[in-house]
Image: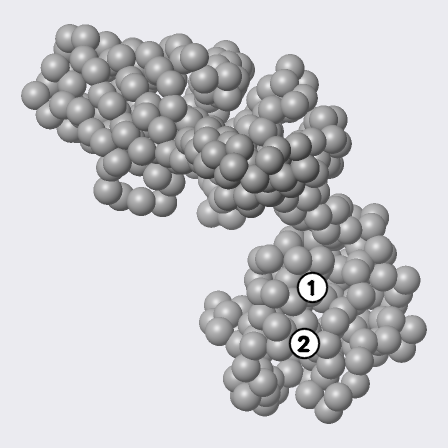
Amino acid sequence: MCYLQAKNTIKSLFRNILKLSAFLMQKNLLYVIFGLFAGLFFSSCSPSEARFDVSSKHFGPNGTMGIYRPGEKRALAALNLNNTKQQLTVPGVEEGYYLVEISNGQARTDAAQFSRHFIYLKGGSYQVTADTAAAAPYPVTGSDVAEQQELTDFYKISESKMSVLRADVAAARKKMENTIFDDIRQVTAEEERLRLMLDEGAVQVIADFASKYPGSIHTPFLLDDLDEATNFPKQYKTILLGTDQSVQQDKLAIKLLRQAEDALGMIPGAKMAAIAGKTPDGRTFDPATDLKRLNLIIVWASYDNQLRKRHPELVRFYHAYKGRGLQIIGVSLDKNEKWRRSAIDHDALPWPQFSDLMGAQSPNASKLSGMMHPYMFLVDQQGKIIRSKLLPEEAISEAKSRL
């Protein structure tokens, strides 16, 4: 992109010079101006140097700080922290998101001994403060890079809001440890509730940040990293539509908005998306004939072994209630037709099965199950979603109560 920008600008400059200059002067100017502008454009697009002024306290002999590309284990640059003021230079960094990891060489479960946060590098200076006596606050305390200044402020907003919420969740989990539950599913449900509390708090932090910085490129990046568009689609959509147009036109923002819209089509009260693909005998989905009084939609794949263990129970349920208006519809996310047919035949599944054999690329994956499988939900005869995200036993119990 930078190369094309430089190329087009220089070509335009050449044309103007050709119109205004004599042959000899034109030739000299071309080389001079070409060198100046090429240097300007290519130097602005090329990697640059990031400089870190690091102050550390209370670290042992194995204290370290490292700069990493997301997803990579090898540090771009590292420093042994010795509880003094030190400097670290990262040459040739390309602009973008990186991770700063600070460790005292001890257990990673201890927040005061290990931390890992995002930073935004594009050349410039960064001030880092690391102290194991503190509960690992965001280490980058200052920078002359505007994007990093915004990111530092995001972590300040996060810490002020999430510290209270984390304390509440910790207290609730402590209470769980001293409670005797009648059913293990109660423990699972409570853990899920607490997890969603933390995730909802994290979404709200991003909402507060986006409200303060509507033009920030960090908003879609932070939402994507949180990866909760399926669980909080309304919030994601509201946050993104509240940003500047330049942010909304970002590829990542467009993807997240699409995910949020798909997820909104999966919540109770919404009309289910049309099922793509065909049955093994070549028939396409027709809601007018395929949907009955109550319909259990099962999004699955032939390799979902835990679900397939429940198929005998679901088959018995289907035969017992199909005369009362029950329909079960399978939507396979397989890519291999042979595997799909083999699973259907082996498990003796009597209900309609649709697939477009596109796997995770299928619109069924994004619009019906939010990329999850197995995934079950109930719809009425008009395709209106009644309940979603059901376990097999929940689906059976809910269906029985409605038939």
| Left or right relative to 33: residue 48 | left
Picture coordinates of residue 248, whole percent (x, y): 70, 35
On screen, 150 above or below 183? above
Tell me if mark 2 has few (under 14), some (14-19) or many (20+) residues whose alpha carbon lies within 10 angstroms of its own.
many
On screen, 117 above or below 163? below
- Residue where numbered disc 2 is placed: 356
Residue 362, by quadrant, is bottom right
- Residue where numbered disc 1 is placed: 363
- Can the viewer see residue 343 in this picture? no
Picture coordinates of residue 90, whole percent (x, y): 27, 28
- Can the viewer see residue 24 in this picture? yes
In the rendered image, the quadrant that contains the N terminus is top right
On screen, 274 above or below 68? below
Please tell me which residue lies in front, 83 or 201.
83
Residue 334, by quadrant, is bottom right
Picture coordinates of residue 169, whole percent (x, y): 48, 25
